[in-house]
Image: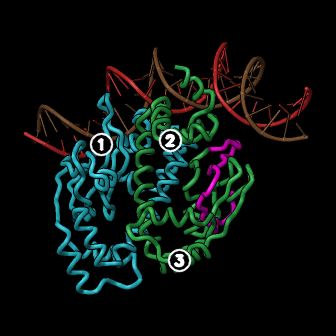
Chain colours: A cyan, B green, C brown, D red
Amino acid sequence: MHQIIIQYINKHNIEPLTKEEEVLVVSSFQLKKLRKKQYFLQEGEVCKYTGFIIKGAMRQYSVDENGIEHILHLYTENYWATDRESSVMLTPSRYNIDAWEDTELLVISRAEMLELMEKIPALVRMFQKLDERNSIASHRRLNSSISSNAKERYREFAENHPQFIQRFPLHIIASYLGITKSTLSRIRAQ
Amino acid sequence: MHQIIIQYINKHNIEPLTKEEEVLVVSSFQLKKLRKKQYFLQEGEVCKYTGFIIKGAMRQYSVDENGIEHILHLYTENYWATDRESSVMLTPSRYNIDAWEDTELLVISRAEMLELMEKIPALVRMFQKLDERNSIASHRRLNSSISSNAKERYREFAENHPQFIQRFPLHIIASYLGITKSTLSRIRAQ
DNA sequence: AAAAACTGTTGCCTTTTGGCAACAAAAAAT
DNA sequence: ATTTTTTGTTGCCAAAAGGCAACAGTTTTT
């Protein structure tokens, strides 16, 4: 179980972790299991943990004043689930994160993560690379959002995230793209 | 001139830079002046440099197949201008970055930046903080983009970026928000 | 096995935004 | 000082997407 995250860290570094570092990592993360629909984070809470998904699927969303859910992030295996803003600034989150399927993740608090990063530079390098990659992905998503119509956005999404198409229903994907499920259905039919 | 970036780095660290580190920083960045409308980066080029803006304003945009510009980022003093994707992956950029006003920036290549970061941990910490802050800002912008209508997006933009309202005309801001200037004008009149 | 919940599609009407053009005022360039 | 360019607004019409509801098929739950 914890081997998965060791392999994941090693994949983002040239030198593999030492045995001591592996022991540190394993002892710092706790395995958490969520049932489908169970919350990892509810709006109004301060986000205290980051979770690395071993198995399953999750979603992060906000709910507007009309009760409509707006999905910002979808997660499957090897994704890190958190609300960074709440975690860093210690403010109540405006987001919810819950399990779309039964899900297993390795969870760590921010304080422990910071300690771990002090002790394991490979972890720091890994997160630097993830930040870089996420920054690039965000940038592309933003470009798509302001310069493409709904049909183009769906096409790009399908190209870039075929795995999400298989794991999530169309109304979830529609929300992630900022459109309604009936609009998405019509777009697919064109 | 270079003092500004020294102060900026120090602001993001607890301990100030040593004299040796300051000398290293100063000798690694070159001052570059751009006239209004002059490119920092043109689409199709690999982005070789990052620029820290000392004075002026810039914008980053893509141009669609109909020749319409879509603005992704606006920059003023203390912002870092670059196309990270092109820079990291060495691919031709799909974006343009140009000066909206006469602009002065301190410029460094990626290779030199990586060397400098090896030598100056404070720089690494600064960029980690910037990545964190940018990630949070991106997240908020994305949330706004998919869950708010144009009027709400403009209101949030005006609250969060009053300085941009003063430096950029409404058609630039409209494009940044993903709407047309006539729509923005109507929204403002409501 | 049956009932309930979920998913995806489609019809019809409304709302939001886009497209285009014209205009006036302000700012910039000459 | 004059001309040119830029900016912001507004009218009118078109297009894209939303809202709502209903339906059929599939999946999940009991």
- Dot 1: within a 10 Å radius of its alpha carbon, few (fewer than 14), some, or many (20 or more) residues? some
Mark 2: amino acid: His
Judge whether residue A97 can be spotted in this image.
Answer: yes
The CA distance from mark 3 to mark 2 is 32 Å
Whether residue A108 sits left or right of residue B50 in the image: it is: left
Report the span colored magenta: B42-70
For image coordinates 43% across by 63% down, the residue present is: B12
Q: Position of residue B17 (x, y in %)?
A: 47, 73
The CA distance from mark 1 to mark 3 is 38 Å
Residue corresponding to mark 3: B116
For image coordinates 26% across by 45% down, the residue present is: A92
For image coordinates 17% across by 55% down, the residue present is: A34
Chain letter of the residue beneath label 1 in the structure image = A
| Element type at mark 2 | loop
- Numbered disc in front, either 1 or 3: 3
Whether residue A99 sits left or right of residue B117 in the image: it is: left
First reached walking from the N terminus: tag 3 or tag 2:
3
Mark 3: amino acid: Leu
Q: Position of residue A138 (x, y in %)?
A: 47, 54
Residue corresponding to mark 1: A94
Q: Position of residue B169 (x, y in %)?
A: 64, 36
Residue C3 falls in which quadrant of the image? top left
| Quarter of the N terminus of chain B within the rendering | bottom right
Q: Which mark is residue B161?
A: 2
Q: Are marks 1 and 3 on the same chain?
A: no
The reply to whether callout 1 and callout 3 are in contact (CB within 8 Å) is: no
